[in-house]
Image (cartoon, rainbow, N blue to C red):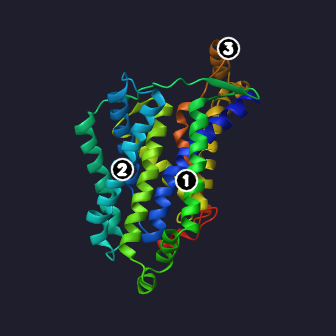
Amino acid sequence: MDIFLQQLVNGLTLGSVYAIVALGYTMVYGIVQLINFAHGEVVMVGAMVSLSVIAALAGTVLPPLAIVFAGVLCAVPVCMAVGFTMERIAYRPLRGAPRLAPLITAIGISIILQQVAMIIWSRNPLGFPQIIDNPVFELAGAHISAVQIAIILGSFLMMAGLTLLVFRTRLGVAMRATSENPQVAGLMGINVNRVISATFVIGAGLGAVAGVMVGTYYGIAHYTMGAQLGLKAFSAAVLGGIGNLAGAMLGGVLLGVVEALGAGYIGEIMDLCHLSGISDALAARCAQDNHFVLFGSNYQDVFAFMVLIAVLVFRPSGLLGERVSDRA
């Protein structure tokens, strides 16, 4: 039971980050039907910028919490600028082009951002400055750190804020109208180009905060960190129903929980010593080492992509979304 609760806490933490990143994918897809594979690299840029700012300010008279906020405040506008530039230079000229063209462009932008980050921050993994105390609390037998609490609460606050923005503001109405039919939205006086740019900028801002969360949680940042994180968040968006905000949130949290529970139990499930009676050689190996684990917790990343394949095979529309094949 303790393992289950612990993995649930870890899964909620991980899933909260996936949900924030998945929102960037699903917002862009919902409004321009583009899978922005460069969004993971925007998250990476957010982590790298905040790392640089925090490292530069560490050791000054500023309190640690203020330094972390300074890192976030610098990362968000930089990522917003990256998101705006991507949309304005790379994607807007291809609007109306065959769908394969912007998809290939997104992959190209992703590679370019990785290479630029490698030039600026080097190819080596960088330790994320840990300047804030991270006390650990016990909750019903599980342990949860202050960083995990901050990530979970921060993520849910951002999800609530984005929901309010989309459903309670004029910009949100314009975004939903553009998502339904950009031509009609334009005839109704909505500046479609401005709304699409705002969508990229908001998604990039969320990605920047997610990058800071990932860097703070794992204590490391690397120029390739956005690739795998982006693929998992994309899997979460597909799981929930890409193009659907609530689906992205649900998919992210579910994917994180599934991945954490899988990591917690896969070692026990795949311990072949449970079947030692079927083979003398296996029995001898288990008598010697007690365990013969075929796949350990280091295979936890496999779960995200197993979920993606299962969803695409059995429910392409996702849990809350419309059919992907109709819009991709």
In depth, the one of 101 and 291 nearer the eye is 101
Question: Where residue 110 sits: x, y (%)?
Answer: 32, 52
Amino acid type at image mark 3? Ala
Relative to 158, residue 280 above or below? above
Amino acid type at image mark 2? Pro
Asked if disc 1 and disc 3 are in contact, CB closer than 8 Å, the reply is no
Asked if disc 1 and disc 2 are in contact, CB closer than 8 Å, the reply is no
**Mark closest to the chain's N terminus, 3 or 2:** 2
**Mark closest to the chain's N terminus, 1 or 3:** 1
User: In the picture, residue 296 is in which quadrant?
Assistant: top right
Residue furthest out toward the left: 119
In depth, the one of 66 and 322 nearer the eye is 66
Question: Where residue 229 sits: x, y (%)?
Answer: 46, 45
In depth, the one of 144 and 258 nearer the eye is 144
Specify the label residue 236 is tagged with.
1
Say which residue label 2 marks.
77
Residue furthest out toward the front: 61
The residue that appears at 31% across and 66% down in the rendered structure is 91
Please say whether residue 283 is visible from this viewpoint. Answer: yes
Disc 1 is placed on an element classified as helix
Question: Where residue 199 sits: x, y (%)?
Answer: 43, 64
User: In the picture, residue 161 is in which quadrant?
Assistant: bottom right
Real-space CA distance between mark 1 and mark 2, rounded to the nearest whole angstrom: 25 Å
**Mark closest to the chain's N terminus, 1 or 2:** 2
Residue 240 is left or right of residue 205, and the answer is: right
Within 10 angstroms of label 2, few (less than 14), some, or many (20 or more) residues? Answer: some
Say which residue label 3 marks.
287
Q: Nearer the viewer, mark 1 or mark 2?
A: 2
Disc 3 is placed on an element classified as helix
Relative to 114, residue 202 above or below? below
**Total numbered labels placed on residues in the image:** 3
